[in-house]
């Protein structure tokens, strides 16, 4: 009797996990691996200086841009300052824009940066997005800025801007 009992338990020990595997519809799949390189915010943090451009060739290089980037929890934060003049004569639009922002960085082939700037005059959020080139320590961002007067919050101009900055420290 003992030999038969041992044989039955051995068969159950082998068949039991197999039935559980089939009953649960599990697949023999390796867990996913993270192929993205580990991101070091230290490479991105710092002060940046560069230019701001408006749409079209006529506006060209319109002004200066300054950007600070600090690590904030799982994202970034800082301040962006743009000083620019677009156009000529009585139709020229000039502005000095300084705003705190929060942002996120995603990285696949090249880090993508998205900044959410708070509009200091009339509220709301302006989004700038673009790429960071680690080898050049440069950041290229694009966004639509709605320039409003501080008194009545009426729109003066809507500008598609490109900000190109390089790390200065």
Image: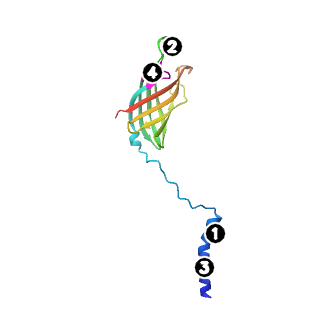
Residue at x 63% of width, y 62% of height: 25
Q: CA distance from mark 1 to mark 2?
A: 78 Å
Measured as percent of width and height from the top left, residue 77 is found at: 45, 37
Label 2 residue SS: helix
Q: For the residue carrying disc 1, how many other residues have a C-alpha within 10 Å: few (<14), some (14-19), or many (20+)?
A: few
Q: Is residue 34 above or below residue 9?
A: above
**Which of the marked residues, 2 or 3, is nearer the chain's N terminus?**
3
Q: Is residue 120 above or below residue 3?
A: above
Q: Nearer the viewer, residue 148 or 82?
A: 82
The magenta span reads: 52-63
Q: Is residue 91 above or below residue 134?
A: above
**Residue to which mark 4 is pinned:** 60
Residue closest to the far bottom: 1
**Residue to which mark 2 is pinned:** 91
State yes or no: residue 5 in magenta: no
- Which label sits in the foreground, 3 or 4? 4
Q: Circles 2 and 3: CB distance less than 8 Å?
A: no
Residue at x 59% of width, y 78% of height: 10
**Residue to which mark 3 is pinned:** 9
**Which of the marked residues, 4 or 2, is nearer the chain's N terminus?**
4
Q: CA distance from mark 3 to mark 4?
A: 82 Å
Q: Nearer the viewer, residue 128 or 164?
A: 164
Q: CA distance from mark 2 to mark 3?
A: 91 Å
Q: CA distance from mark 4 to mark 2?
A: 16 Å
């Amino acid at each position: 009797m003992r030999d038969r009992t041992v044989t039955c338990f051995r068969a159950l020990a082998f068949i039991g996990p197999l039935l559980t595997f089939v009953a649960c519809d599990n697949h023999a799949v390796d867990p996913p691996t993270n192929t993205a390189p580990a991101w070091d915010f230290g490479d991105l943090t710092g002060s940046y200086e560069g230019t701001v451009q408006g749409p079209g060739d006529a506006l060209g290089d319109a002004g200066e841009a300054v950007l600070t980037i600090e690590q904030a929890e799982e994202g970034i934060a800082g301040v962006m300052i743009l000083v620019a003049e677009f156009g000529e004569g009585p139709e020229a639009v000039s502005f000095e824009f300084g705003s705190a922002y929060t942002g996120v960085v995603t990285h696949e082939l090249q880090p993508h940066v998205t900044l959410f700037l708070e509009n200091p005059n009339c509220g709301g959020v302006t989004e700038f997005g673009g790429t960071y080139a680690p080898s050049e320590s440069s950041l290229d961002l694009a966004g639509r800025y709605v320039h409003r007067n501080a008194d009545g919050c009426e729109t003066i101009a809507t500008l598609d801007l490109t900000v190109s900055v390089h790390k200065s420290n």
